[in-house]
Image (tube, rainbow, N blue to C red):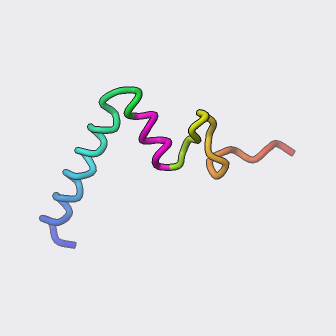
Amino acid sequence: MDRERLERIKAALEAYTDKVTSTSAAAKAALEQEGIYMKDGSLAPEYEEPAAA
C-alpha cells in the first residue's frame, strides 16, 4: 500500500470517528449499527464474556 493511500484511509477513519463521537446519541447509534450493542442496549452476544463455571 502506498503512503498516499494510507493517508487517505487514515483521514477517512479520523473523519468517521469524529462523526460518530460527536454526541452520545451518535456514539450509541454507531455501536448499534456496528453490531456491538443491541437495540435494547444490551451487549451483543458475541461480545459478552462467557459465564463463570
On the image, the x and y values in percent for residue 15 come to: 23, 44
Q: Is residue 27 above or below residue 2?
A: above
Q: Is residue 36 above or below residue 25?
A: below
Q: Which residue is farthest bottom? A: 1
Q: Is residue 41 above or below residue 15?
A: above
Q: Is residue 30 magenta?
A: yes
**Residue at point 23%, 54% (across, down):** 10
**Residue at point 53%, 49% (across, down):** 35
Q: Which residues are magenta?
A: 27-34
The image quarter containing residue 53 is top right
Image quadrant in which the N terminus is located: bottom left
**Residue at point 41%, 28% (across, down):** 25
Q: Is residue 22 left or right of residue 3?
A: right
The image quarter containing residue 36 is top right
Magenta highlight: main SS: helix
- Using the image as rendered, state which of residue 45 and residue 11 is in the foreground: 45
Q: Is residue 43 left or right of residue 3?
A: right
**Residue at point 28%, 38% (across, down):** 19
Q: Is residue 21 left or right of residue 7?
A: right
